Image: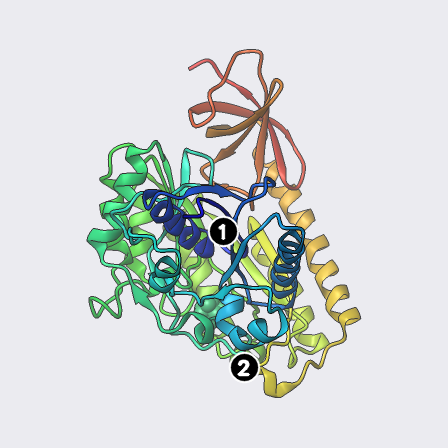
Amino acid sequence: MLKKINFISLGCAKNLVDSEKLMGALKLSGYNVSFESSKPSEIVIINTCGFINDAKEESVDTILQNVMLKKEGKVHTLIVMGCLSQRYKHELKSEIPEIDAVFGVNDFDALLHYLNASVKPSAYIARSQTTLPHYAYLKIAEGCNRTCAFCIIPKIRGKHISFPIEDVVAEATMLAENGVKELLVIAQDTTFYGVDLYKKQELAVLLKKLTKIEGIEWIRLHYTYPASFPADVLKLIAEEPKICKYIDIPLQHISTRVLKSMNRGIDKEKTIKLITKIRKTIPDVAIRTSFIVGYPTETEKDFKELCLFIEEMKFDRVGVFQYSHEEGTPAYIYGDKKSDKVKQKRFDILMALQNEISEEINILKHGKIYKVIIDTVFNDTYVARTAYDSPEVDNEVLINSKKKLIPGQFYSVKIFASDAYTLFGEVLEN
Ligand code: SF4
């Protein structure tokens, strides 16, 4: 039996959790599994992303790199799974015949059967964690019931399926037993949690249960949806010390006309009301959001409206995406109306605007003391994060310390300098 597997995971954290679960099951089935190793492996599994053009290109490039390794005899079996193959199964098979097997997004059983693996991934099977040992993504549902006009995910991942509360809690407990202190709660739409399974939004109930898990100190909520945002979640975040005062809420746009054409189910007025309510309920909350520029129906006036909104709202963190014209999405009928030049120009304007805002917000942190967790260390420089910063996407706190600090441990740090994306701090004696 071929033994060595190299697992490559592309795309979002939800894909990463799928990869970690599969890797855990393959290890328990007797395979020697490495993650994104440069060493040759008999079997390579690529968990692809097929969301937007850039992601598709990255997935195809990664496949072709491994086709090369196969031609050089360094790889025996090449397996492709995930969103790109869910979307383009036939094209992949016909255009890249060197691929030995193609699986979709929820084809775990078929893939494991193909590899004669006996163990099935589940909430009760140890994941092969790929993140730093002290934090992990906790996926609470699959799929999405929303119909955002620019988005192909519901077509790829199917309808929203909430994972049972007891399964999610069991998985989180196992992660905590393995040393995880910070849980990043994710799904396509976390606020929809429970509607299918329990006939009502149960995110607050789930989060409350997660706060009871010994060893978990930080719980961070990602991918919330603005329309029908559950009020009990805001109240819980405000009350529960373990839940980070942090909300990730992609808004995509602010012009009511564009939001309508995007089929977002919310308008400008309600969006502003929600942000105001979030800030009133959780006074020191950090809000991360993201916007799409260059959407087919977006006019220069709509774009100006968006700039003004970002200037007024002063979000802690903003991600900007250039519209990607995806066949199979409702917005495809509009045609890709905005040139790459216009998309790039609007992208640059928003990024520059937010850069200034992030700089201003970070200056207000000077002299303040924060609880931070140490992520990594380079020589005497420690890279840490506050409870207001999610891994890989938000601020890093850089700390120069002669005193040895332990990755995964919490420390009190006083901020003395900053730039738009970095805080500089000194560790305080506990
Ligand atoms: S909420 Fe909208 S953007 Fe997000 S996955 Fe669902 S359809 Fe796509």
Task: Identify the colour scheme used.
Answer: rainbow
Outermost residue toward the bottom? 333
Q: Is mark 2 within 8 Å of ligand 1?
A: no
Q: State the CA–CA distance, disc 1 to disc 2.
A: 31 Å
CB under 8 Å between discs 1 and 2? no
Q: Is residue 120 above or below residue 362?
A: below
**Left or right of 34, for residue 420:** right
Question: x, y (%) of residue 264?
Answer: 48, 75
Q: Quadrant of residue 297?
A: bottom right
**Is 107 left or right of 53, judged from the image as shown?**
left
Residue lying farthest to the right in this orientation = 341
Q: Mark 1: give few (<14), some (14-19) or many (20+) Cα within 10 Å.
A: many
Q: Is residue 400 left or right of residue 288?
A: right
Q: What percent of the width, then of the height, locates residue 187?
A: 39, 59
416 vs 401, nearest the viewer: 401
Q: Amino acid at mark 1?
A: Ile
Callout 1: helix, strand or loop? strand
Residue name at image x 36 percent, y 73 percent:
159
Viewer-proximal residue among 285 and 47: 47
Which of the numbered marks, if any, corresponds to residue 328? 2
Give residue 375's mark. Answer: none
Q: Which residue is mark 1?
A: 287
Residue 321 point in image, percent of width and height: 63, 63
**Quadrant including the C terminus:** top left
Q: Residue at x 66, y 85 (%)?
A: 335
